[in-house]
Image: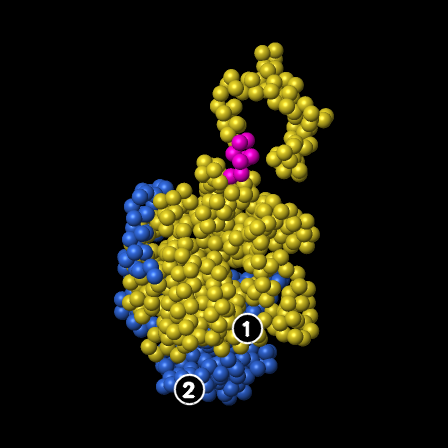
Amino acid sequence: MTTRTEFLSRIRTEVGKTPGLFSARTAPRPSDPRAVSETIKRELAERWPQALERFQLEFERVAGVFHRAASIAVVPQVVAGIARENEVRRLVAWDAPELGADLLDALTARGLEPFAMPPGDLADATERAELRRRVADAELGLTGVDLAIAETGTLVLRSGAGRPRSTSLLPACHIAVFDRTALIETLGQAGVFLELWNRGELEGRIGAVTSFITGPSRTADIELTLTRGVHGPKEVHAIFVDQAIRG
Amino acid sequence: MSETDLSVPFRRRAGSALGDKHLQEALTIATTKFIGLRRDAFDEFPEGERLRDLAREIKEATLQHLHRYVEQLIDSVERLGGHVHYATTPEEARRVVLDIAARTGARMAVKSKSMASEEIHLNEALEAAGVIPIETDLGEYIIQLAHERPSHIIAPAIHKTKGQVADLFAKELKRQVAADPEELTRIARVELRQKFLEADLGITGANFAVADTGTVVLVTNEGNGRMVTSLPRVHVAVMGVEKVVPSMTDLMVFLQILAKSATGQKLSVYTTLVRGPRRPGELEGPDEFHLVLLDNGRIRQIAGPLREALYCLRCGACLNVCPVYRQIGGHAYGYTYPGPIGILLTAMLEGPGSVKDLAHASSLCGACADACPVRIDIPKMLVELRREIHEARIAPWTERLAYGLMEKVLASPSLYRWSKPLARLLQRPFARDGRIRSVPLAFTEWTRTRDLPALAPQTFHEQWPTLK
C-alpha cells in the first residue's frame, strides 16, 4: 500500500519540476473573519429589507415557498396552515434552544403531532434507531437557519447537538424559520462565515456538516423533465420572522 | 449497448451512435438545453468572467504548492478523527474500500454520484466482495439497472427514454410501471429511501476538499449526497488528488461558477460540507470517516503536458458545446470520461496510447475552451497529444506516413514544387469532375465519408506570375 510519505514525496517531486503555467495566487482570505462578519451584519442592519426582498425573489425562483410572520408566536399558525394544505400532522423539530423558541404546545394546540429532537446524542443504538424511525415517519421538519443568502435564495444549516441533519432531509416538507440576523447578501459573504465557523473556538462546538439548501430536492434525469422531491424534501418553506426570534 | 466494447474501433462506435436515431434526438435536445441554461446563467451574472479568471488562478496556485495543500488536508482530516488513505492505482483504491467494508462488516453500500468511483470500477469490485452497491443518483440508478455506464458527466442517463426507464423499473420491481417521469421519480424515492436507511456504507466522491478545514464538499440536486453522508455508519469519500482547494474563501469562488456552468442554476440544490465523522452530541452521521486520495496518473501530470486538465471541475460544459460529443454522445468515447476533457483525462489515466483515435475526435473549434469555467485550453493539449502519439509511433503507420510526407513537402520549397506534378499524375485514375471520391489501399477509410477536392490543373501559386 502507498504510504503518506511516499504519496506526498511523489507530489513534492513533481511540483518541484515545474514553475507552473503562470504566476498565480489563491483568493485573499479575511485575516479576521469575526471582525469582517460583524461588519457584514452591521451593514445589513440598514439595508436588510432589500436583502429580504432579493431573498424572497430568488427563493421563489427555485420553487421555495416564502412566508412572513410578525413574531415567533405567529409561526405555529403558519406551520399549521402548511400542514393543513398538505393534509399531514406528524412534525419533527429542532430542540427548542436551537430553534430559538419552544413551539411544541402551540403546535399541539393547532392539531399537529410535534416531536422535538433531543438536546444531544442518545444513550444507545436502540434509542437512536427508534428516533430515526420517528423522523423517517414524520411529514414535516421544522428547523432554524444559520444563514439565508439573498443572492441565491439559499438556506444554510449547521448540524450539531439538538439540530440533527435529518430534520431538514427526511420529511417530505421542510419548514425553516429565520429572522434578519441570519440574512446576508452574497455567497462571497457566506465564505466569511465559513472561515469563522471552521476555526478557533467555534470549531469544537459545531457539528460535522454544513448544508446549503437552495429549494426543494430536484432531478431532471429522466428526459430532462424537472421533477421535485426525488430524495430530499418536495417542498421547502421559509418563514421570515420580523421581530427577532431570540427577543 | 452495455459495457462499451473497446475492441470495436472508435470509428465503428461513433458510426453506430450516428446511426441511432433516438440517441441523436436525445443528444440534440439535452445539449442544446444545457447550452441555453448556461448562457442565461452567465448573462445574468456580470461578475462571472472575473470569477472564472480567479478560479483558474486558484487552480494554478494550488497546483504550484499541491504537496503543501494535500498535507494540510490530511492533517485537518486526521485532527477531526477521520482516516486518510493513499491510492496510486485503481487496484489500490478498490482494495482500500474493500478493506473498510470487510472490517466494518458492511453488506450494502449506498453511493452518491462519483466519477472517481466510476473511474476505479468500484461497483464491480464491491459486488465481487459480496457488498451490494446501490447508485442513488436517479440517473446513475437507471444506468446501474441497465448495466451501462454514464453517457454524460452530469446527466448520466440522457440517452434513455422514459419508456426504457419504465421497462427497467418494471423488471426490477416485477410490476407494471407507467412511463411517466413524475411517477418514476416517486418510485425511485420509495425504493432508494429504504436503501439509505438500511445501508452500512456511504460512498461518495468529492467536488472539492478544503485543505484548511479538512472539509469534503459534495454538490447534488437530489439530496442523495446528504443521505449518504448522514445515515450509514461509515462514510468513504474517494477523490482525485487535484480536487483540493486551499480555503473556504477559495471554495466560494468555485461554487459561484460550478452550477452555472453545469446546469445553469445559481447554486445546485444541495451543497454539503462534511467535516469528518459525527461529533460529540450529534445524533446522526457516520462513526467513521475515510478519505481515499487517488493518484491514478494525475500526479505525474503536475509537471506533464496535461497539467491544465488537472484544473477540471467536472461540470460537463465542454461536452454540451462540442460538435463531436453532440453527434456521438458519451458511450462512443469508450472510457469513463467522455467529451473533449474526457479525451485528455483518458490520456492521463490510461496513457496516450489509449486515445490514438480519440485525440482526433475533435474539430479543434475551441468551443470547449470558451465554455470551460476555468478556461482550460483543451484544443492546445489535444494538438500536443496528437504530436506525442505521432512521435511515439503509437499512431497507425498510414497516418504517420501521411504526416511524415506532409511535413517534408511543406518544409521544403523545392519538394513542394515537385510534388504538384507528381500528385496530378497520381490522382489521375481517381479524380472525376474535380473530386476524388475514393482512394485505394490503406487510405479508403479517409474517403469513405468524405470527398477530396482534386488538385487544380494550376495552383494559385503557379498562376501568380501571370496574375501579377
Q: What residue does disc 2 label?
A: A127
Chain of the residue under label 1: B
Instruction: Specify the principal SS of the magenta part.
Output: helix
- Left or right: A225 in relation to B269: right
Colour-to-chain, yellow: B
Of all residues, the one furthest to the right in this rendering is B433
Residue nearer the viewer, A135 or B135: B135
Residue depicted at 67% across the width and 75% down the height: B175
**Residue B246 in view in this figure:** yes
Task: Inspect the magenta stretch and tell me whether residue B102 lies in it.
Answer: no
Q: Which residues are magenta?
A: B395-402
For the residues bearing labels 2 and 1, Cβ distance under 8 angstroms: no
Residue nearer the viewer, A189 or B337: B337
Residue nearer the viewer, B122 or B202: B122
**SS for callout 2:** helix
Q: Which mark is residue A71?
A: none
Distance from label 2 to label 1 (Cα)? 24 Å
Of all residues, the one furthest to the front in this rendering is B441
- Left or right: B197 in relation to A189: right
Q: Residues within 10 Å of mark 2 (few under 14, many from 20)?
A: few
**SS for callout 1:** helix
Residue flagged by tag 2: what amino acid is it?
A: Glu
